[in-house]
Image (spheres, rainbow, N blue to C red):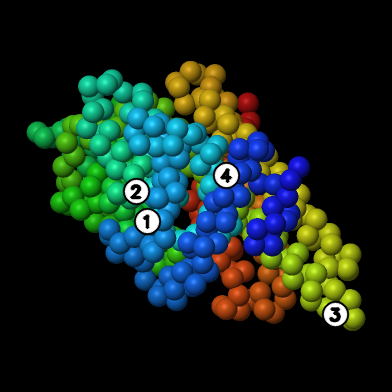
Amino acid sequence: MGRSTVRGRAIGTGIGITEEHRALAHSVRGWLARAAPPGEVRELLDAGSPAAPGVRPAHWKALVAQGLTGIHLPEGYGGGGGGLLDLAVVLEEAAYASLPGPYLATTLTSAVLHQGVAAGAPVGVEALCGPLRELAAGDRTAALALGPGTLTVTPAATGHRLDGTAPPVLGAGAADLLLLPAVTPDGERWFLVDAGAEGLTVRPHRSVDPTRPTAEVRADAVSVPAHRAVPVADPGLARDLAAVLLAADACGTAARSLDTAVAHAAVREQFGRPVGAFQAVKHLCADMLIRLEQARALTWDAARAADEGTAGEAAGAEARALAAALAAATAPEAAYTCAKDAIQILGGIGFTWEHDAHLQLRRAVLARQLLGPADAHRLQLQP
């Protein structure tokens, strides 16, 4: 199996196991090194305030030009014709580079929106095709709530009325569109809402990861036209897709932590020897690699199952949910543990603001917050 040498990365082969996916990862990695240098991340971190609505990061135009905003969408919507596994490969590399901004939130939203469009009647979803094409083209950004929170919907003269508050929404502060679930007497329904809609308040949080902050979304008598209801038949679909993509992001975070730790252990000396020569450090690095490879394998399987299990068949949906739960229970924990272990191997320098080690820890903590505790996902695996 080939190993990458770009940016000094030489451990593991990534989520993608085919030659096409390895080539995609190599291409994205090289592009990120040029288009999204560490200085851009540091500027956002030092600014301490989230981007305003409609403001795009400096790398956004180049990212769109690479076709990465729609790589997972059909060509009919302006996408690249790939699947969720292709997107997972890209997200792993984006996380490795600590890519800031709305890329993860936007691609997750477009993935769920596409499934809603695909599941609905052609006439009923025509109004949703335009926003989907805009997301694929990178003309607009979006964010998705992973749960309804206290959001409820009632019939209104113009369609629907939305009230309540969603749980923390990744990227909502700078998003143009919001995909929100709400509770109805018949179950959960999804609605595509403009971020500037009257009665909708988006309040950015002081997030643990300032490069990708969350926000509170509150609706007070927000009017949603009937054609903005998204026909997501499977209530677990959005959370399954979120689990897959956040797991891919976590794999990139874990990989960056591991490479950072190994590189430091090879050059830092104590008692006349590199610290990597000591058994305790060797075992720590080996454990990090085991966690990373396990997370990658489960994330690959979850992405494959999601690509095969979004057509509505009961068996496919069950396999998708199972694989997503495994990835969600494993990958964020691997990223969190690897980030902590890397800081320990780095020693004092790993605790400083100037070193990038805390960037990986921040991303890992955010993934755990969004997906919830690993034990909750493990409970889904019980018969």
Tell me whether the residue at label 1 lies in contact with that at label 4, contact meaning CB atoms closer than 8 angstroms. no
Spatial CA span between label 1 and label 4: 19 Å
Query: Which-is-in-front pick, marks 3 and 4?
Result: 4
Q: Position of residue 86 (x, y in %)?
A: 53, 39
- For the point 56% across and 78% down, the residue is 353
Q: Which residue does the numbered mark 3 point to in the structure image?
A: 270
Query: Which-is-in-front pick, marks 3 and 2?
Result: 2
Q: Which residue does the numbered mark 4 point to in the structure image?
A: 24
Q: Position of residue 321 (x, y in %)?
A: 54, 31
- For the point 90% across and 81% down, the residue is 272
Spatial CA span between label 2 and label 1: 8 Å
Instruction: Give the quarter of the image for residue 117.
Output: top left
Q: Which residue does the numbered mark 2 point to in the structure image?
A: 138
- For the point 76% across and 42% down, the residue is 1
Tell me whether the residue at label 3 lies in contact with that at label 4, contact meaning CB atoms closer than 8 angstroms. no
Please state if 229 lies on the left or on the right of 187 as rendered. left
Q: Earlier in the sequence, mark 4 or mark 2?
A: 4
Query: Which-is-in-front pick, marks 2 and 1?
Result: 1
Q: Residue furthest bottom?
A: 271
Type of the residue with mark 1: Lys
Type of the residue with mark 2: Gly
Q: How many marks?
A: 4
Spatial CA span between label 3 and label 1: 46 Å
Q: Secondary structure at mark 4?
A: helix
- For the point 23% across and 28% down, the residue is 126
Query: Which-is-in-front pick, marks 3 and 1?
Result: 1
Q: Which residue does the numbered mark 1 point to in the structure image?
A: 61
Rate crowding at label 3 as few (under 14), some (14 to 19) or many (20 or more) other CA atoms within 10 Å.
Answer: few
